[in-house]
Image (cartoon, grey):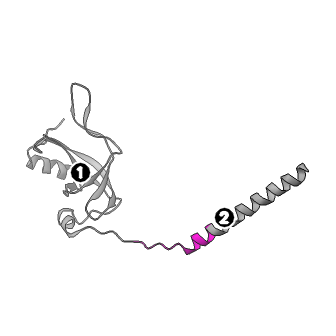
């Protein structure tokens, strides 16, 4: 009797599993995917240099600003272009940059691996070009 009950349970379980898997196969077979190519908007294309491509290593700017959005100080940061979207370029910091270490020991700047969306086009091929841009803004303070 126990063997019969066990066989019925096993048979029922197999039927349920096979019915579900055939439904999933049909669902997967009917799935279609249309890849949409994302391109920079014209407004962003004007700000971003032509050489910016996914995977490119370059320099961005880390700028400390006041509550009124006035820049105080800035430093270059080595970064990689991760993704180009319609309205921004996703960047990943390849180094940690410290602008200011406050009395509560909170670091102000950017950490290695941190990601940000670049919308202003402040990207430069070399460290020196990035420093020059900060000097023009009169906010570069060397270490």
Find numbered disc 2 in the image and state the secondary structure of the residue it sits on: helix
Q: Is residue 29 left or right of residue 94?
A: right
Residues in magenta, as a range: 24-35
Residue beneath disc 1: 60
**Considering the image in quadrants, where does the C terminus appear?**
top left
Q: Residues within 10 Å of mark 2 (few under 14, many from 20)?
A: few
Which one is nearer the viewer's eye here, 98 or 36?
A: 36
Left or right: 87 with respect to 16? left
Mark toward the start of the polypeptide (1 vs 2) = 2
Point out the residue furthest to the right here.
1
Rendered image quadrant of residue 53:
bottom left
Image coords of residue 22 (percent x, y): 67, 69
Task: Please provide percent x and percent y for residue 122.
Answer: 19, 55
* Foreground tag (1 vs 2): 2
Pointer 2: what residue?
20
In percent of the image, x 10 and y 46: which residue is there? 135
Pick whichever, 51 or 41, lies toward us: 41
Q: CA distance from mark 1 to mark 2?
A: 52 Å
Which of the 4 image quadrants contains residue 99? top left
Q: Which percent across, then down, holds residue 111? A: 31, 40
Q: Is residue 33 left or right of residue 48?
A: right
Q: Residue 58, image x and y in percent?
A: 27, 54
At 20% from the left and 58% from the top, the residue drawn is 121
- Secondary structure beneath disc 1? strand
Does the segment drawn in magenta span residue 88? no
92 relative to 6 in the view: left or right: left
- Residue at image coords 18%, 56%: 120
């Amino acid at each position: 009797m126990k063997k019969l009950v066990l066989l019925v349970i096993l048979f029922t379980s197999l039927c349920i599993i096979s019915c579900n898997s055939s439904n999933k196969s049909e669902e997967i077979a009917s799935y279609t995917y249309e890849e949409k190519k994302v391109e920079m908007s014209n407004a962003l294309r004007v700000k971003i240099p032509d050489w910016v491509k996914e995977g490119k290593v370059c320099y961005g700017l880390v700028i400390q600003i006041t509550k009124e959005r006035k820049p105080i100080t800035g430093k270059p940061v080595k970064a990689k272009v991760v993704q180009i979207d319609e309205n921004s370029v996703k960047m990943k910091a390849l180094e940690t940059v410290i602008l200011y270490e406050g009395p509560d020991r909170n670091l102000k700047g950017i950490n290695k691996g941190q990601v940000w969306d670049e919308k202003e086009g402040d990207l430069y091929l070399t460290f020196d070009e990035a420093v020059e841009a900060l000097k023009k803004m009169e906010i570069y303070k060397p270490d």
